[in-house]
Image: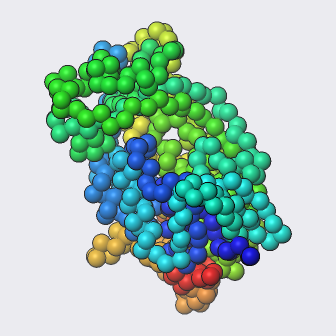
Amino acid sequence: MIAPHYPVVIVGAGPTGLTAAILLARYGVECLVLDRWDGVYPQPRAVHLDDEVYRILARLGLAEEFAEISRPARGLRLVDRDMTILAEFRRDNARNPHGFPQANMFDQPELETLLRAGLTRHDGVSMCGNSVVTRVEHGRDHVRVDFTDRVSGEQRTVRADYVLGCDGANSTVRTSIGSAMEDLGFEQRWLVVDIATDADLAQWEGVHQVCDPVRAATYMRIGDTRYRWEFRLRPGECAATYADLDTLRPLIAPWTANVADTDLELIRVADYTFRAQLADRWRDRRVFLLGDAAHLTPPFIGQGMGAGLRDASNVTWKLAGVLGGTLPESCLDTYQRERKSHAKSMIRLAVGVGRAMTEGGEFGNVLRRRVAPMARWIPGLNAKVTDSVTPPLRPSGFVEPGLRRGLAGTLCPNPVLDVDGRRLDAQAPGLFLVVTSTPPTPGQRYEIERRGAVVVTAAPESELGRWLARGHAVAAIVRPDRTVMRAGRSLSAVFTTLPTFLLTNESACNTK
């Protein structure tokens, strides 16, 4: 019997895998999602995403639904072990170049429920739960995926043109391609506590970071009634040491002193080892690694889950183009080149922040007490701490900085473009854009549209026009993931490098 065939098989139905599946579905790419669980994994894990990642959720058609389950965070407060405020960095969520608050707290199971519901709106996506992938093997012109039904024990096989390994830190797909995790030199054990309560904790509505080498801690409100604490564990401690509210009370007391235990519902206590790791290879021929299968980030800057969604956003439009026959297969080489260096930069930033807040012994503690209160006097520091902008992607076949990097590799902003309130991302979603402050000639417009792109003319005084001016450019090619491919001072010089991407809409690439 010939095994069923799918253009893409996605292993893992967490946020990364589900995001990849929806993005592919919007291009009409048929895919199969395999996951070891039958439904949403019920335990909360990730709790934060920034406006760049929120923008990806909007591309999935889930912005309004996510707004209902999330709450903007107001910034970061540094405190010492006595809860004395060392510094406070407030975030202005009205400043949102991508159209959404720069920091957003949420409950991961609720997000995954939204993603699964979003997946059901698209034809051509099959979900198979209770499926444990046991082998991923390249054939001559396909990839073979073997998996076992956890309930019946039945062994099954499917074939795929491409496989996306979104199966987490203990990835079977990563093992199958012989990729290994590189240790970036950070490992700490932390206790994670999730509590629900209707009581008013009367706390500042931002993230509280306790800078203490003995018991570093983080507190944050993640929902109307949900709260998260993280405490660094001492040697010999584990989750069992703090199995109930009685044993947790000394840790959470600074925030819950006026709330009775009867008003607190303990949702979860777990111990985690926070690591900084990066896979040495993210691709082997037709198999790709995404999310925690490719990188592990300490949680200090809240970028772990978001990195996986960035992976999905990066690779899916390229796969759609290859499967649709309008992009060369070699373009898939740009995925690791662009994403690996970006992920490594974010991991290093998280490690640096974590060490600055939690290490150095008593000397570090004294130094933080003296230095942190002076932070508010440093020009621009508050903006740096609260800004959600991430590094530009490194040069590749789809990032062409020219002699000066300028805008290439950065995200194009997402301003409102018309009186109906439609933003840039609503203009030809899923396609290339040519953003220009110089109106094209009829011949230029014809050539741009012939290659499957859409022209967006930005008035010089508009937000988009000012963005071009700051980048010393009059025109930019903006990729389907809204990263700038190339920008320059001449529209003619820019659009001649525009690749052909013949998709009239996000459902035009039908590869069934």
Image coords of residue 347 (percent x, y): 57, 38
Image coords of residue 442 (percent x, y): 54, 90
Q: Residue at x 63, y 61 (%)?
A: 154
Residue 45 visible to an observer of this rendering: yes
Q: Residue at x 48, y 36 (%)?
A: 299
Query: 477 above or below 472?
Result: below
**Residue lying furthest top in this view?**
362
Question: Which image quadrant for residue 399?
Answer: bottom right
Image coords of residue 245 (percent x, y): 29, 24
Q: Residue at x 74, y 64 (%)?
A: 144
Query: 271 above or below 420?
Result: above
The N terminus lies in which quarter of the figure?
bottom right
Residue 497 visible to an observer of this rendering: no
Question: Which image quadrant for residue 367?
Answer: top left
Q: Residue at x 44, y 31 (%)?
A: 270
Image coords of residue 30 (percent x, y): 58, 75
Q: Nearer the viewer, residue 129 or 482?
A: 129
| Color encoding of the figure | rainbow
Q: Nearer the viewer, residue 12 or 351?
A: 12
Query: 268 above or below 509?
Result: above
Using residue 433 as the reference point, say whether residue 458 is left or right of it. left
The C terminus lies in which quarter of the figure?
bottom right
Using residue 60 as the reference point, say whether residue 279 is left or right of it. right
Total tally of numbered discs in the picture: 0
Using residue 71 as the reference point, say whether residue 492 is left or right of it. right
**Residue lying furthest front in this view?**
152
